[in-house]
Amino acid sequence: MKTEFKAKFLQHINKRRQDQGFTLIELLVVIIIIGILSAIALPAFLNQANKAKQSEGKQYVSSINKGQQAYYAENTKFGTDVTTLGLGLKTATTNYSYSVDGQSSSASALAKPTNPAALKGYAGGVGLVDAGEAKTTQSILCETSGVGNPTAPTYGASAVACGGTDQQVTK
């Protein structure tokens, strides 16, 4: 009789455990872990969204630089606006507005963010530089160190450089 009582008691305890759900402590621990993970992941996700928008500005300015070099090779002068380069680029998108300033020995392109408080600005330039006995074109792509509007690159006889002290050469 004693072993029969033990067996019934163990069956009763096993059945009771199966009927129970999670305890309140277990649920709170899971919710806290999910909260910590989302607090870590959300800023990283928002930063990636801004990086994707900034890649548009960088790509457009790089394309304008290459278009200016091709335009100079064909016409021995630089283009004065985005449409004359024949690249099929827009002068404004939802993230940036683009402008081109073509001179006789240089040309600059600016990508000004529509939201300067959230996005970096980009500036590009193509200039004629001395390469020994002949002149060649040299291009540069500059990025503001923080968010904001860029300044045009500077042009010298031997090099093209970023214009503002807050800008760096991008790769």
Image: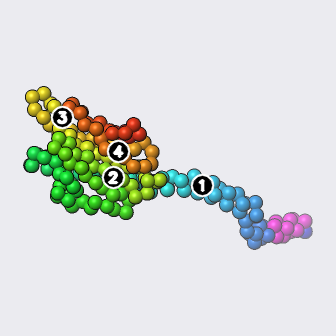
Under mark 2, the amino acid is Ala
Under mark 4, the amino acid is Thr
Q: Nearer the viewer, residue 138 or 50?
A: 138
The residue beneath circle 2 is 111
* Residue drawn at the location 42% of the way across and 42% of the way down: 145
Whichever of callouts 1 and 3 sits on the residue coming sooner in the sequence is 1
**Left or right: 102 with respect to 145?**
left
- Quadrant showing the C terminus: top left
**Left or right: 34 with respect to 141?**
right
Under mark 3, the amino acid is Val
Residue range corresponding to the magenta coloring: 2-13
Structural distance between the alpha carbons of marks 3 and 2: 24 Å
Q: Nearer the viewer, residue 104 or 125?
A: 104
Query: Could you say where residue 148 lies in the image, as x and y percent from the top left?
Result: 43, 49
Question: Residue 129: which disc?
Answer: 3
The local crowd at label 4, few if under 14, some if 14 to 19, many if 20 or more residues have their Cα within 10 Å, is many
Whichever of callouts 2 and 4 sits on the residue coming sooner in the sequence is 2
